[in-house]
Image (tube, rainbow, N blue to C red):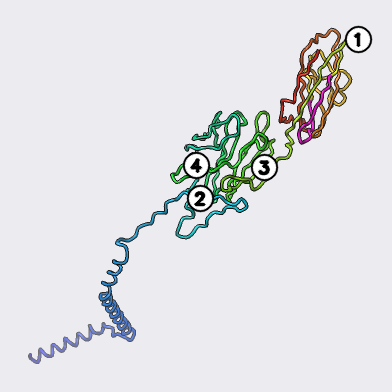
């Protein structure tokens, strides 16, 4: 190479150092530390990879021999098992089994039925009381109150037998006129899913209670039923019935009352009067008119006093009240027409009132012979007529001649 060429090359290198190398940043201490750490991590990754290559094959093979062939899928719930109610000591309340983690709270079938499900099922009801009734074996409960059907009035749900599963409790009436019998019945479900009858909770009776107004199942399995002493209907409004909440619990084979009153006191809207009357025999008086008397006895057979009594005597219109015997009347019987009416005051429980009432028929009045109805009607203090428990003895036929 010639000297001229050597000088030219040197100038090119000098120019390179001035323009290019000035743009290059000389690494400082921080850059050096970052570089060292990166190299260390790369060495750790390489070491770990090598270890897995040495041991991975045997570990995977052990898992394949010890575990299932496939990854497990979702576990189906344990099928329900039918459990019969266990008889319990009446003194010891039945408690529901506690739920455990990882398993169902109860193995008993769920006996919850909706109203529609219960109406669509064939059921067997406990027998109705003696006398005309509705069918009970393999029947359908009705959603309306047609005559002669078992009418579903109300339902509720709860664990009433203590097996940890829910049952259905229903208020049913056998519709016979306005006062058909009623009962509360508990239903459960068997292992096939069908409705089965657990038992009767409570029913109406000829005496008391005559009516069931509602039901409620509480958390401890007690079935609360609102019972009434007198059934509505026949002139008796429902608001006059005395009402009580009574509680019933399952005792292994039947339901028994565990809370609430067990009897009713006298109903202030109810009475039980009885009346008798002797024959009215009219004889001729000195002035030509005809007079005579009848003895009327009114007895209060009820357990409560009757505030007022209205006595009615349906004698012929020509036979009018005379003077004697009418003083106890709170009104003026002479001013009443047919029937002749006498208002009486309070008659205590078990007490009776005897009246000897005189009558007169004008001379020549065509009285003839026959019978007149004598009736005693109980009333409240505000002159509202009360329902008499036995209306048949509230009236009697009185002969006259």
* Res. 196 mark: 4
Residue under the point 32% across and 86% down: 28
Q: Residues within 10 Å of mark 4 (few under 14, many from 20)?
A: some
Mark in the foreground, 4 or 2: 4
Residue under the point 51% across and 40% down: 115
Dot 3 or dot 2, earlier in sequence? 2
Left or right: 53 with respect to 77? left
Q: Residues within 10 Å of mark 1 (few under 14, many from 20)?
A: few
- Numbered range of the magenta stretch: 294-310
Disc 3 target residue: 244
Left or right: 9 with respect to 189? left
Mark 2 and mark 1: Cα distance apart in space = 89 Å
Placement of 103 over or under 344, stated as above or below:
below
Dot 2 or dot 1, earlier in sequence? 2
Tell me if residue 103 can be seen.
Answer: yes
Mark in the foreground, 4 or 1: 4
Secondary structure under badge 4?
strand
Disc 1 target residue: 287
Secondary structure under badge 1?
loop
Q: Dividing the image into 4 quarters, which one contains the C terminus?
A: top right
**Residue 249 counted in the magenta span:** no
| Residue 376 percent location from the top left of the image | 77, 25
Question: Which image quadrant for residue 244?
Answer: top right
Disc 2 target residue: 165
Dot 1 or dot 3, earlier in sequence? 3
Left or right: 280 with respect to 224? right
Q: Answer whether labels 3 and 2 touch (C-beta < 8 Å).
A: no
Mark 1 and mark 3: Cα distance apart in space = 63 Å
| Residue 317 percent location from the top left of the image | 79, 14
């Amino acid at each position: 190479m010639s000297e001229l060429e050597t000088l030219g090359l040197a100038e090119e290198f000098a120019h390179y150092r001035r323009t290019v190398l000035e743009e290059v940043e000389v690494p400082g201490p921080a850059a050096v530390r970052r570089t060292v750490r990166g190299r260390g991590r790369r060495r750790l990754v390489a070491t770990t990879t090598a270890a897995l290559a040495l041991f991975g094959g045997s570990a995977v093979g052990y898992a394949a021999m010890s575990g299932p062939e496939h990854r497990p899928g979702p576990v189906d719930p344990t099928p329900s098992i039918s459990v019969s109610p266990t008889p319990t000591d009446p003194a010891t309340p039945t408690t529901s089994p506690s739920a455990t983690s990882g398993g169902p709270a109860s193995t008993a079938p769920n006996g919850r039925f909706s109203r529609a499900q219960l109406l669509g099922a064939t059921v067997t009801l406990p027998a109705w009381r003696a006398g005309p009734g509705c069918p009970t074996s393999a029947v359908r409960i009705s959603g309306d109150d047609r005559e002669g059907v078992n009418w579903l009035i109300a339902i509720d749900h709860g664990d009433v037998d203590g097996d940890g599963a829910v049952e259905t409790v229903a208020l049913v009436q056998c519709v016979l006129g306005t006062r058909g019998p009623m009962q509360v019945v508990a239903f459960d479900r068997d292992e096939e899913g069908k409705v089965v009858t657990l038992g009767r909770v409570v029913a109406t009776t000829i005496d008391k209670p005559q009516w069931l107004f509602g039901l409620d199942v509480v958390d401890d399995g007690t079935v609360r039923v609102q019972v009434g002493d007198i059934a509505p209907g026949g002139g008796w409004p429902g608001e006059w019935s005395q009402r009580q909440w009574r509680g019933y619990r399952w005792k292994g084979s039947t339901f028994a009352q565990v809370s609430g009153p067990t009897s009713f006191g006298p109903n202030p809207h109810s009475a039980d009067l009885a009346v008798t009357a002797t024959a009215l025999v009219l004889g001729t008086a000195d002035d030509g008119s005809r007079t005579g008397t009848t003895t009327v006895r009114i007895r209060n057979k009820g357990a409560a006093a009757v505030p007022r009594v209205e006595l009615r005597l349906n004698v012929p219109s020509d036979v009018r009240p005379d003077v004697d015997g009418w003083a106890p009347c709170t009104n003026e019987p002479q001013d009443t027409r047919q029937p002749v009416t006498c208002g009486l005051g309070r008659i205590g429980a078990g007490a009776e009132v005897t009246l000897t009432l005189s009558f007169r028929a004008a001379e020549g009045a065509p009285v003839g012979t026959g019978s007149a109805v004598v009736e005693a009607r109980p009333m409240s203090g505000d002159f509202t007529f009360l329902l008499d428990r036995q209306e048949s003895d509230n009236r009697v036929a009185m002969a006259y001649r």
